[in-house]
Structure formats: C-alpha cells, structure tokens
Amino acid sequence: MRRLVYEFWEAVRIAFAQIRANKMRSGLTALGVVIGIVAVTLMTTAILGINKGVDESFAGFGTDVLYVTKFPWDGGDRDWRFYRNRPDIRTSYADRISEWIRETPDSALMRAVAADNTAVNVSRGELEVNGIYLLGTSHEMALISKSDMMEGRFFNEFENQSGSRVAVVGFDIADALFPNESPIGQSIIIRNSPFRIVGVAERQGSFLGLFSWDSGILIPIRAYRHSIHGRDEGDVRVQYDVIRADEARDELRGLMRRIRQLEPEEEDDFSINESATIREQLDPIKNGIATAGLVITGLALFVGAIGIMNITYVSVKERTREIGTRKALGARRRSILMQFLVEAVCICIVGGIIGLAVTWGLAGTIAAVAPSFPIVFSPAVVVLAVGLATGVGVASGFLPALSASALDPVEALRFE
C-alpha cells in the first residue's frame, strides 16, 4: 500500500513537470475541458439561481398555502370566458372556512385568510410612488407569510377587527417615501385616506418579474373595504399541513363546494391554486438552459477528450525509450499506466480549475450587470466540475496509458 501511494505521488510530480515543460501544448489540450466545465458550471449556477430567485419571490406568500380564486393560475383547459363568468370569490368565505377549522380538530387545514388587492398611488407630502400593490388582508397573514419584519410590527387582531388605518409597507416603499428617516409611526396617503405605518417588511428582492413585497403595502381588510374597495370579492388563502397536502386540497375543495351550494353533478365554479403552479411554468426555462448547457458541454468535453487522448499518445511515443529504461530497471506495468493516466487526469483537473475561475468571473459580471438575478456558486458546483474533469481525464487517458504499460522493454529501448 505504501509503495502504491509513493508511486501515485511520484506520478503526480512527473505529470506536473510535463505540464510545466509543455505549457502551450497542455493549455491547448485542456481548452476543450475548460469550455465544457464553464458550460456545465454556468448552467448549474443559472438553474440554482432560478430556484433561489423563485423561492425568495414566493417567501412572502408561503409555500404551504392554497389559494381559492376565480381563475386557474395555469390557464385551465377551458376558454377564458368560461372562467370570467364564474361568480366572484367572496373574502367572507375565509370566516366560514376558519369556523370549519375550529370545529374540526383533525382538519388538514390550519387557517384561512381573506385577501383582496389592487394597484394604487401612494404619497407622502410631495413624494409619490405609482402602481403600488395594495393588499387588504387579516392579521393572520403574518402567520402565513414567511417574510420577516425589518422594522416595527404587523398589524394586530384589534386593528384588523376595528378597521384601523394602519399599514405594513415594503422596503422599496419605505425607501422611496422616507429616504432618510424611519417610517414607523408616520402617515402615507392612499386614495385620499391617511394610513399610519406600523411596520416595514424585510427586503426580499424581485426575480423574473415575479411579485415582491418590496413594492407592496398591506392594510387590514376592513379598512380596505371602507377606504379602497367596498365590494366583498377577492380570494381566500388557506394554510395547510404539508404532510397532508392531498388531503388538505380535497378537504378545501369539498368545503368550497358546500359553501357555494353546488350539486353533486355540477362542476367546480372556483379554482384552487398553489405556488407550485407558477414554479412549474418556469420549468421550460430551466429545461432550455439545461439542454443548451448539456449540448455545449457534451461537444466541448468530447473534443477535449479526443485532444487529451491524442496528446497522451504523442507523449507515449516521445517517451518510449524512457518507458523501456524504466521497465528494464524493474518498473511495474501499473507504475507506467498510473504515470500516463495521472498525467491525463492532471491536465483535465487544471482545465477544470481554470473553467471554475472563468465561471466565477462571469458570475461576478452577471451579478454586477443584473443584480436582481441571484447567483448561486455552491460547493456542489465545484464538486461537479472537479468530478467531471477527473472522469474525462480517466476516460481519455486510459487507453494511451494502457498501451504504454504494455510496451516490450527491448523494443522500447530500440525505438528511435
């Protein structure tokens, strides 16, 4: 075992000596591997970034929430006019669902929250921001949402029941209207009505145009009905036990059919959606990136492997007399095989490291140019790159190394 370890490290030393002695040749040989590693690591970084961006964008919604709405989020399998003609979803349904949850201890549903939204202009003195997402909801939204508070608090049950004109604002709203001071306790004007700010949500960031609480405002649903929109319509958001997800969906569907007083033969006149629907709509983007990355990676690594195999054969020819001398002095076949195999692997690993460095630089450039795109350069990317480079080295270097180890020492010494 000790001899094997010694032979391995001796092969590594010889390999790097050969790389240093033939820098240009080694660099050109490794170029295909560099391109392949850059392609696969950029692809992996992009997919991980998309996943992270989607997760952050949905952090404010909660991933364990079902949404009772008029329209299906995936477009449905019927004409849009069919869904348009459905009766509106009443936010008062949330009270009936909450009552069911209280009366059913073993329910898979946990809590129901009413919600209605619109776009408004918000001002404070001479400062104004337009097209702001305004959400009227209940105090229990704080339990459903996974967003933390950067400053202040969420409005409480008393403020919700009494319809107090209080508001929780997103980071961008606070930054735009209160650039140099704390917004807590100060007032903003929404539809000519003053609302006192009690909390500022932690910065969330936006991604691919998905919703972000940074540009949103939350107010109590009763204040929303009194000052913004008086009709009882919107949607209902129901948090459920993720361990019993299928049961929760069926339970909510049956409960909504009962609330809507639908006959058994009638089809649903509502939709139950979840954030996974939007995630699935992003799958084509990720699949496109993965396909393009795999094609480029495959071609680059194939060309790189052929180049490394060719150069390793050339190296065997150049050092045939050396191989004969080593065999005449007692070198084993495995030592010769290991020497050339390790050399091929080392070239690939050097190419992989260079590829990682290029990817790191490109990722930094992307982060500077498009700061809204999350960059995820994880240890898994490094492991993938090194593992792929090692695999290419072994695959491309094995046959030349095997041919070197099989050389007859007499014939090798007579080689010119």
Image: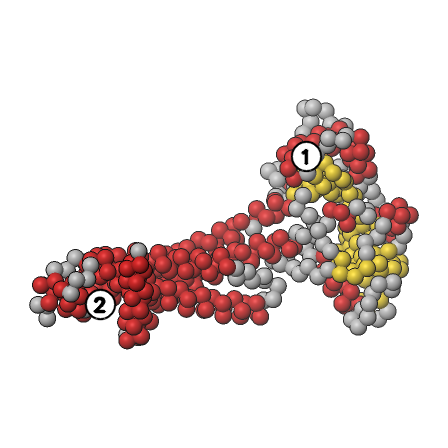
Where residue 223 appears, as percent x and y from the top left, is 87, 50
The kind of residue tagged 2 is: Ser
Q: Position of residue 351 (x, y in %)?
A: 37, 66
Q: Counting other residues with Cα less than 10 Å from the Cα at mark 2, is it few (<14), some (14-19), or many (20 or more)?
A: some
In the image, residue 103 above or below residue 65: above
Q: Is residue 390 left or right of residue 197?
A: left
Asked which secondary structure carries label 1, the reply is helix
Is mark 1 in CB contact (under 8 Å) with mark 2?
Answer: no
- Residue indicated by mark 1: 248
Q: Is residue 269 left or right of residue 93?
A: left
**Mark nearer the viewer, 1 or 2:** 2
Please rate how many residues cluster around mark 1, counting C-alpha atoms within 10 Å: few if below 14, some from 14 to 19, many from 20: many
Q: Residue furthest front?
A: 2
| Quarter of the view holding residue 208 | bottom right
Q: Residue at x 44, y 57 (%)?
A: 384
Of residues 76 and 327, which is closer to you in this image? 327
Sequence-earlier tag: 1 or 2: 1
Question: Residue 265 lies in what quarter of the image?
Answer: top right
Identify the mark at residue 315; answer none if there is no mark: 2
The percent coordinates of residue 348 (x first, y second) are 35, 63
Q: Amino acid at mark 1?
A: Ala
Residue name at image x 68 percent, y 38 percent: 241
Residue at 84% of width from left, 66% of height from top?
A: 124
Is any part of residue 70 visible from this angle? Answer: no
Q: Position of residue 253 (x, y in %)?
A: 69, 32
Which image quarter is the N terminus in?
Answer: bottom left
| Label 1 to label 2: alpha-carbon separation | 66 Å
Q: Taking 343 as reference, is 159 above or below it?
A: above
In this view, which residue lies farthest toward the top? 264
Q: Where is 17 relative to 41, above or below?
A: below
